[in-house]
Each structure stands twice: as C-alpha cells, then as structure tokens.
Image: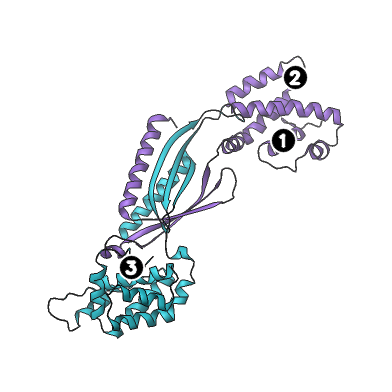
Chain colours: A cyan, B purple
Amino acid sequence: MGILTNAPQGFSEAVSMLNVLPQSLLGEMCQDVMAFLQYKPGFINIDNYEISVSMLPVASGQLIKAEMCINALKYIFRSAALQTLSVDALVSELKSSLLFQDNSLVVLKEVWKIEGPHLCSLPKQALSVGELISMDWNLGMSMSSNSCRSLNSPHVGLELKVSESRGEIKTTNIHMSLPEFQNFATQLKEMSNALETA
Amino acid sequence: MSSSGEVDKTLLAFLNGLARRNFFGENQFTDEFLRDEVLGNINEDDYAVLLKRFNGIILSMASGDMDYTQLDAFLTSQMKKRQGALSEIEAATVRRFWKTQKNKIHECLVASSTWDSSLKNLSWRVDVQSKARHIDQLNQPSVIVELKVGPAGKEEVNDVVRFELNSEKLSELLSQVNDIQKAIDTHMQV
C-alpha cells in the first residue's frame, strides 16, 4: 500500500511548499525530523524555521508555512519507516504522486539513504501506537463463589478496543477493584493536566 | 502442646501455615512439614485430628468472611461443642490468627474468583500526535498510554496494550470515569 494513500488533508499543499525551499533548508528540516523520530523526546524548533522561511524570496501569493512542511516530512519518514522502505522504493512512491519536484526528491533520497536504516531499526512501537476506539464499562458486585460464600466484592469492569497499525482491533478486558479504579481515574486526570500545560 | 501467655504460639504457627498453603499457594507447607517442623513431630493420628478440626474452622471463617461479632459467636459455639470443643486458649489463638490474616485471605479469595485480567501497571507520557486528519494537527500534544495486564492475584504480566489519546478522546474518557463514579456512589455504600 502506498505510503501516501492515507496522507492527511493539506498534504499536497505542504509538499508544494517543500518544493519551493532551497535544498539546504529542506535538508536541515529533514535532518531535524529524522532526529526527532529516532529519539522521540524533544521537539523541533518550528519558530526558527518560520523565521528562515519568512526571509525567502517567493512569488507573490505563495505562503509558506514551516510547520506544514515539517509535518509533511514527519508523515513521509514515519510512514516509510513503518513499511521499511528501501531508498529506491521511497523515491519511486514519491515520484509517482507527481507532487514532488526533482530538487526535493534529491534531498529526501539522500537523507533516507543515510538516516533511513537507523530509523527502520527501531522497534515499530516507537513509531506507531494504536488508537483507542472505545471504552465500555460495567459496575458489578461479586456476591458469592464456590470458594467463598461471602465474597461481597464490588468491581469495575472495562473493555478497551484498540485499533492497531494493520487495522486489526484488539479487545482487552480489565477487572478493577474500587481502589484500583480510583487510581486509574486519578491518573487520567493527571494526563489531562499534563496535556493542558504541554 | 506448649502454651505461653494468652495464645498458643505453636497452634498459631500451625494456623498460619495452613492459611499459607490453602490460600496463598505456598506449597512448601506440606502436611509432613507442618506435623514435623511446626508441631514438633506429633504422631500422625493426632495430626490428622488436628488438621481436620482447624482446617474446618479456618474454612468456615474464610467462607463467611466473618467480622469480629460473627467470629465471637462462632468461637463460642465451638467452645460449647460436646466433642472436640475448643479450649479458651485455642479460641484466643484462633482470634489472634483471624485478626492478622482475615484481610489477606479475603483478598486472595476475591482474586481467585476474578477471571478477567487485572491492571498491573499504567504508564503514560505526553507526546505529539502521530496521525491526524489534517496536517495542521500533527503537532498537537497527545498522551501515549501503556497498560500492563495479567491474571488477578499474581504479579505476572501477560499482555501490553498501548494507545494514543488526544485531548478530545481524553475528555471523553474522563466523562465516562465520572459516570462510573456516579454509579458507584449510587449503588454502593462503601
């Protein structure tokens, strides 16, 4: 399956911006993206790139957004790594989209040739995670069992459905005591706080 | 059997050994070990009687998850039995045993009646979104969550579930968590 078939909206627009960048700037962006993908923590200094981009001589009417360029590059390299594409395979896919100009292709090819193998050697989980499709829950009370007449144990049951990279859906059932559920709830709130301040 | 103070320490050790074997799965507490090492090599017939009597008592207490009121009533009736009645010291020893082991035994029984996996570990980190509908969103922070699950009552991990949550999805989950909390408050007096 072509790596560009599921590209997010705005991808072609982003590539047309990439095509306008001088090769040295494009090369820099590629390096930063590859480093970012390999060492996951950290960030790319988008503000600096926006400044560089704003100083380029461009035809009137064309707006270049560094952030869109970077995002497109992340998408390309992440997808290529997930499918462990060879240099030739990557170039051929990008070429057949008719979106990329030759000078962009040259840069991307060179970066992938040098950095691609490192990125591909990372475990796939570092590159892709599943998406939570649904969480169903129930609240129950186990009254009694063959090993204990007076079980009287309240519990929360969760059923999580996660879609994995190949489109398979994995279902997991988890049983929690009330204290375990409270802890789970607390952690979710901490995540929410962390996201707000991120 | 020797006795000292309020409780019979040898009997207490025997009761603890039985609990560890019957509930906590510690198989080294065999009959041979208990009869010989813990009870000081009493003869086998005496051991058989002792085993039947106290196993029965422990199983009754565990099955009913007796509170202290129920325990006292139970021990009183055991002391009044015509045959094999408990002595004062034995009753006191059983009471001491139950005080220390009651909760742990109950937890084990709950775990053994739980057939779904339980959550062993939850880790998470804030990351940037890896998939998005629009290219502008590929920089949005998201949370990567990793759950480790395994059989209830054991430390073993037999599955890892990993997924990404954006702030929208996380809000949905939080709202469901609120619903669960409301259900708990409504249905259960904890």
Q: Nearer the viewer, residue A112 or A68?
A: A112
User: Which residue, given by chain and number where applicable, does mark 1 sit on?
Assistant: B18
Tag 3: residue type?
Leu
Q: Residue flagged by tag 1: what amino acid is it?
A: Leu
Q: Are marks 3 and 2 in contact (CB under 8 Å)?
A: no
Q: Of the numbered discs in the image, which one, if any, rests on residue B151?
A: none
Disc 1, SS: helix
**Chain bearing mark 1:** B
Label 2 vs label 1: CA separation?
20 Å
* Front in this rendered view, residue A169 or B42: A169
Q: Which mark is residue A4?
A: 3
- Specify the subunit that label 3 lies on: A
- The residue that label 2 is drawn on is B85
- Image point (30%, 70%), residue name: A72
Residue at horizontal 46 percent and vertical 39 percent from the top: A157
Q: Specify whether disc 3 shares its chain with disc 2.
A: no
